[in-house]
Image: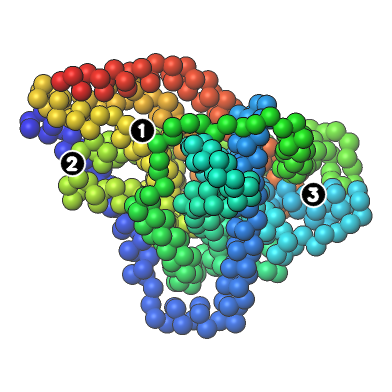
Amino acid sequence: MKRNKSFYSAKYLLLAYLLLTVVWPILRLFSSIRGEHVAEVLSSAQFLPMLQNSLLTTLMATAISVGLSFALAYALCRSRVRFKSVFVVLFTVPMLIPSISHGMGLVLLFGDNGLVTNLLGINIGLYGYTGIVMGSVLYSFPVSFLMFYDSFQYEDFTVYEAARVLGLSRMRQFMTITLPGMSRTVLSAVLAVFTMVFTDYGVPLMTGGTAMTLPVYMYREVIGMMNFSGGAVVGVVLLLPAIAAFLMDLRKSNEGGTASTITKPYFIEENKRRDVLVYIGFAVVLFLLCLPIVAFVCLSFVKQYPTDMSFSLDNVKKLLSNGIGMYFVNSMAIALLTALAGTCLSYFSAFVTARSHKAVANKVMHFVSMLSLAIPGVVLGLSFVLTFKGLPIYRTLFILVLVNIVHFFSSPYLMAYNSLTKFNPNLEDVAQSLGISKLRMLKDVYIPCTRSTIVEMYSYYFVNAMITISAVSFLMNFRTMPLSLMIPQLESQSFIEGTAMVSLLILFINLAEKGIAFVVKRSVEKGEKTMIEQVNAMTAAE
């Protein structure tokens, strides 16, 4: 027991940290609301139109995003197209830039003075529902695509073989086997995309026009007018659907029933016509995805859009004079510190909950670790303002790192949790009988065997800390502002060439980080599987 004293001290310290940074700010948000604040916001003439705008655009974007991602994942996994891993990477590139950049990209292309609008002379009426839905689909569909793609990898072909023997057509097989088998993933994708779109203010801020949504209203009330009470009421409204979605998803995952042992991988028959059609469909989707990036490249190096389209580096000079160097350093510092500290904290939390007995404290830690999935960034940012305002850490880089760790905690935690549950459940008992402490097991067994997962966790934190605009926008000041928040600032100054260049810079940084993570992960993956098998075999022998 003495050997594990440090482990238990660290465990309860981490639990206290999670309660302080996750639970307490949300409680503080609820406690700040008064009856008159609720009546003032809910009875205002603009509340119902804003709620309607948020719900309608979210429902439309969710339906299109989930449908598109399902079709792409299905086509990729049910065809014999080459370079599948390349297509997976290309379809997820939109995850590497802020949501506000997607909105800005659409404005540069299809706005009243956009590249496509001027070239073809056709105005699609971007501002309003059209722009919000288009930008939200670009921003959210990669998340659901990855969920579907992962699920399709684990389908058992023996069920389809039996269906063919019984004479079921392909359509019947799709309706009776594929869709029911994907029901759990479809629900998770719908809930994830709905929450992302409903609580995002980046896209509607750029493309919403007069169709204001609740997150944009909250952003303007708090940032522009310092109306914390009104912002808190809207924050709770945004929080309730997210919590409901989280609880539904959690309940469904606890029910299980969809997991199965794969006895035979899915066999794909040769069909050249099908593969050609898939290539054509992928080309169209990738062309549309690349249009905003092409717009960023074009506008970054022109003298002045649209009057002088000659090549120029003047925009670089203007950005340097606007302090982009300082904001770049801020973003890199925030991303690196968030990734380092966040990976350590989420991994240790997963180690505690996955490799310890299901005590009350461990169950509480598991629930709180998952809870940040249900807290939208705008709500978390305002909650941190109400909780930490007046303290020395307020409006420093430290609090930006802190809020990012909380904001993105759940996904890396689940990565580590799933990896750590692969080990033999009796491993701790064997270690205890040999007098090996828990922290020694963590250092010598678990970390070496899950290095690829740790790399993936680090990459997830870094990329999201680079692109986030929601929570940090409430907590930054001029000296601590990250790169991503230069985009709305430059847009308000009508410096659209600068917004394009900042978006492009963020994309290149994240692509470089992803490339480094890929190389490192490939180098550490080789021996991991063997190490896990050896550890489990030794445990079974003991």
Q: Earlier in the sequence, mark 2 or mark 1?
A: 2
Q: Quadrant of the N terminus?
A: top left
Residue with the mark numbered 1: 419
Q: Residue at x 18, y 34 (%)?
A: 7
SS for dot 1: helix
The residues tagged by marks 2 and 3 sit, at their Cα atoms, a distance apart of 55 Å
The residues tagged by marks 3 and 1 sit, at their Cα atoms, a distance apart of 43 Å
Q: Earlier in the sequence, mark 3 or mark 1?
A: 3
Q: Earlier in the sequence, mark 2 or mark 3?
A: 3
Above/below status of 312 relative to 63: above
Residue with the mark numbered 3: 109
The amino acid type, in three-letter code, at marker 2 is His
Give x and y (percent) for residue 109: 79, 49
Give x and y (percent) for residue 280: 77, 38
Q: Are marks 2 and 3 in contact (CB under 8 Å)?
A: no
SS for dot 3: helix
Q: Residue at x 32, y 25 (%)?
A: 447
The answer to which of 446 and 501 lies nearer the viewer is 446
SS for dot 2: loop
